[in-house]
Amino acid sequence: MIKDELRRQRIETPSWAYGNSGTRFKVFAQQGVPRDPYEKLADAAQVHRHTGVAPTVALHIPWDKVDDYADLARHASDLGVAIGAVNSNVFQDDDYKLGSVTHPDPAVRKKALGHLLECVDIMDRTGSDTLKLWFSDGTNYPGQDDIRARQDRLAEALAAVYERLGEGQRFLLEYKLFEPAFYMTDLPDWGAAYAHCLKLGPKAQVVVDTGHHAPGTNIEFIVAFLLREGKLGGFDFNSRFYADDDLMVGAADPFQLFRIMYEVIRGGGYTAETAFMLDQCHNIEPKIPGQIRSVMNVQEATAKALLVDRDALAAAQREGDVLGANAALMDAYNTDVRPLLAELREEMGLDPDPMAAYARSGYFEKIAAERVGGAQAGWGA
Ligand code: RM4
Ligand code: MN
């Protein structure tokens, strides 16, 4: 039953989506933006309240540094949400100009590893089971550093983090083609991430950020491949027109999102073991509605993917019926699933239209009035 499958969907929102963000040119402040992680969680709870499928929130350390993480986790639970993945940050310190865990200087590598291990401590205290590792490491010029030595340093750090993981904890290794490094990135693609994870063991898996590929890359192939190998840990969903645009998932290419979700379902990855996370920034649009819209976009793509007549598709594929097979996918994709999702929400005791329900709730007016003074949260660009 498609509705049952949709009812148990879980989409994680990122704490940083609620803070101010922008490009390297300008960060536009918005009204009512959280001043601390507690307020970010309150905003995330609104997304869950209106969608019913976003019960966890990813943290980013040090952006979400607090004195008492157990208290933060309690605050989340009081709001009806929980802490999801802990994201490390070894890209915003002057020491990391030439790299973090791949830096030529052992003292910098030690500092970076210390941060990654601290993130595992935070997992212990918040009850999080997932560490997400993204490295901005790379070089800008040919010859700048030794590509091979940097791989050795990366492997050494990953092994140390892996060693530290407790029972029921894992890390997700994220790759990205380029940026901020423009010549060579130390983890540029899924193959490199996969090879490192494979060597380490089952607690190391790859995370696919949909904005981190060259234009035209067949992301659903990567999904199918990693799932088949048991190495797909999850997603950082967002959409892009050019590079790592971090726009709302499903905005640039809803068809791609559908194809990805189809491969997830086909490959048995539509389970709690796969983390469906959003990694987005709402630079010009309001943030909470931006997250609600994104969650709805993922739901719609999932519903369409669940609608694919797998038997008809398999039969067409067996018979070499190229057009029939393609039609089986397109029929599902071209179905308007919004009435189905509206019905499901009503069954879940939610408003059928989460965007309108949020707008009516008065929450925005409340935070705009209350959150005056203090420093708004942001990622510091
Ligand atoms: C990176 C990467 C990480 C995210 C940061 C903010 O490009 O996607 O997942 O934590 O941005
Ligand atoms: Mn990401």
Image (cartoon, rainbow, N blue to C red):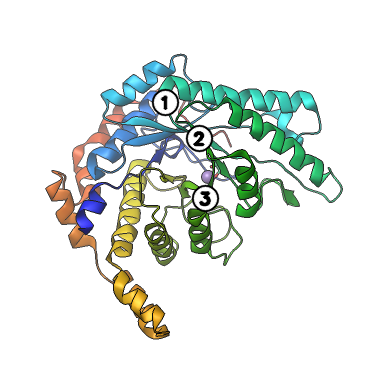
In the rendered structure, which disc, 1 or 2, sits on the residue that comes first in sequence? Answer: 1
Asked if the beta carbon under badge 3 is closer than 8 A to the nearest atom of ligand 2, the reply is yes
The alpha-carbon separation of the residues under discs 1 and 2 comes to 23 Å
Residue 188 location, x and y as percent? 66, 51
Is 15 displayed left or right of 333 in the figure? right
Farthest residue, direction right:
143
Please indicate, yes or no, whether residue 99 appears anywhere in the rendered image. Answer: no
Q: Secondary structure at mark 1?
A: helix
Identity of the residue drawn at 35% across and 26% down? 371
The label number, if any, that marks residue 288 in the structure image: none
Residue 228 vertical position relative to residue 107 in the rendered view, above or below: below
Is 208 displayed left or right of 4 in the figure? right
* In front of the other: 335 or 39: 335
**Residue tagged by mark 3?**
209
Identity of the residue drawn at 84% across and 51% down? 142
Labels 1, 3: front one: 3
**Identity of the amino acid at label 2?**
Arg
**Residue tagged by mark 2?**
170
**Identity of the amino acid at label 3?**
Asp
**Residue tagged by mark 1?**
37
Decide: few, some or many residues near mark 3? Use Cα within 10 Å; few <14, some 14-19, many ≥20.
many
Q: Secondary structure at mark 2?
A: strand
Residue 220 vertical position relative to residue 6 in the rendered view, above or below: below
* In front of the other: 378 or 271: 271
